[in-house]
Amino acid sequence: MKSLRTRTHRILCAALVQARKGAGISQHELARRLKRSQSFIAKIEVGERRIDVVEFIEIARALGREPADLLARALE
């Protein structure tokens, strides 16, 4: 079963967007911190691209968040 665009995937994307905005960080700044393109971040946030566990951890840390806390928030 594919997880792209499922309810859980949309919730995870929304949690990432909320965490980024809550940290006061733009997509461009997050991409710079991750040494990725802004479109990489945009595709994740709109649900066009899935992320693996390692990428999730990197994104959470780049946002100054604990990955487990961010994941727990997405699962609420």
Image (cartoon, grey):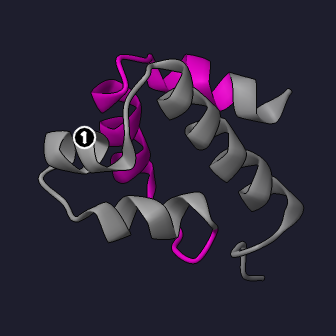
Q: Which residue is mark 1?
A: 29
> Magenta segment, principal secondary structure?
helix
Residue 51 appears in the figure: no
Magenta includes 11?
A: no
Kind of residue indicated by mark 1: Glu
Image coordinates of residue 20 in percent, x first then y, are: 48, 32
Q: Is residue 12 left or right of residue 64?
A: right
At horizontal 53% and vertical 30% (from top left) the residue drawn is 21
* Camera sees residue 70: yes
Task: Tell me the residue at 65%/51% (across/down).
Answer: 13
Where residue 59 sits: x, y (%)? Answer: 36, 40
Q: Which residue appears at 25% of the width and 40% of the height?
A: 29
Compared with 71, 3 (above or below) is below
- Residue 69, horizontal then vertical, whole percent: 59, 17
Residue 23: x %, y % from top left: 45, 19
Task: Please name the residue shown 73% across and 34% down the image.
Answer: 74
Q: Is residue 30 above or below residue 23?
A: below
In the rendered image, which quarter contains the C terminus? top right
Q: Which of the pair 31/54 is nearer the observer?
A: 31
Say whether residue 56 is left or right of residue 19.
left
Mark 1 neighbour class, 10 Å CA radius: few under 14, some 14 to 19, many 20 or more: some
